[in-house]
Image: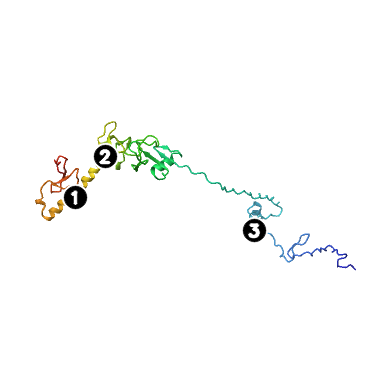
Amino acid sequence: MTSIYPQNGIAPPPIFVRPPPIINQYKAPIGGGVPVGAAEPRPHGVLDLVSAFVGMLGFGSSRKTGTVRPGQAAAPSVPKAPPVMRRATPVSTAPLPPVRRSVWFNRVLLSDQLLPVVDHIFRRRVADGSYWYDHVSGEWGVEGRGRSGKIRPGLDLGGPLMADASKGKTGIFVNGREFTSWEAIRLRWATSVPRGRYWVDHNGNFGPEGGPAKGNVRSLATKKILLAGAMSVAQAAAASARSAGSGSDQSSGQRLGLFSDNPVLSDGQGNIGWCGHDGSSASFGS
C-alpha cells in the first residue's frame, strides 16, 4: 500500500485529475442530429427562403452583428496599433526675456537706451503707442489727436513733425502740424487767426511762417479772460443798481478799478471799455 505522506521529507508531486465533461442537453451530439430536448425541425417556408436570400445578399443580421453564416469564412481580424505615448513637454524654470517696449515719436521707434531718458522727462513711464512731438514749442500728443501736454523744446525725439500728426482738417498749420477743430477754437478765442501757416515758440509768441512775431498767445488769452470777467462783474453791478432804482444817478464812465495796468470803465448800462495808460478810454461795447 502506498503512503500519502512524504517520505524522507520530500513531498510527492500533486496529482491532477481531469474533471468530468459537462454534458449540455441542448448541444447536438457528436455526428450531428437533433439536440436533446430541441423541437423537431419544421419544413422551410417562403419566409425562410426570403430570409436566407436576404442574408446571402449581405443585408441580414449577420452583417450587423458580425456573426458568420454557415459556409462563410471569417474575416481576418486586423490588429490594433498600440497607443502612442508622447513625452510631456518639460517646463522651463529660466526667467522669461524682458518684453521690448514699443514707443514711437513722430513715427520713429525709440531705442531701449533712450526710453529711460524719455520716462525721466515725462516723469512717468510712457505707455506703448505712437505720439507726436513739436520740437519748436515743446507740445506733444497722441498721434491722431490734439495737444496733450508740454515738455522741453528742442529735444532729439523722433523724426520731423508731420502735417497729419493730429489728423486735423482746419487749414491752420502751426509749426508744420495742422490743428484739430478744438485747437483752432481755442486759438481763435484768443485772437483772430485765418487759415494759413504760423509758428509758435515755447513762450507763446506767434507769427506767420517765415515772418516776425505778431503777438503772444498767452497774453492775448489772459486779457480775454480778464475782459470776460470784468464784463460779468460790470453787468452784475449795473443790474443791481437798476433794481435798486439808482441806475440813473450813476455817472457815465465809472471806474471799476479792477486792474491797475489796464483799468476797466463802465457806462452804467452794462457796457464796458478799456482805459488806456494815458487816461483815454476805448469805445464801449456790450
Query: Badge 2: few (under 14), some or many (20 or more) residues near its Cα, within 10 Å?
Result: some
Image quadrant holding the C terminus, namely top left
Residue drawn at 12 percent across, 55 percent down: 244
- Which amino acid does the dot numbered 3 rest on? Leu
Name which of mark 1 and mark 2 comes first in the sequence. Answer: 2
Residue marked by disc 2: 217
Q: Are marks 1 and 2 in contact (CB under 8 Å)?
A: no
Image quadrant holding the N terminus, namely bottom right
Task: Kindly report which numbered mark, 1 or 3, lies closer to the viewer in this rendering.
Answer: 1
Residue 218, percent from left and from top: 27, 41
- Which amino acid does the dot numbered 2 rest on? Val
Name which of mark 1 and mark 3 comes first in the sequence. Answer: 3
Q: Nearer the viewer, residue 15 or 121?
A: 121
Q: Nearer the viewer, residue 61 or 140?
A: 140
Left or right of 39? Residue 122 is left
SS label for mark 1: helix
Distance from Cα at disc 1 to Cα at disc 3: 115 Å
Residue marked by disc 1: 233
Q: Residue furthest top?
A: 210
Q: Nearer the viewer, residue 37 or 193?
A: 193
Query: Badge 3: few (under 14), some or many (20 or more) residues near its Cα, within 10 Å?
Result: few
Residue marked by disc 3: 47
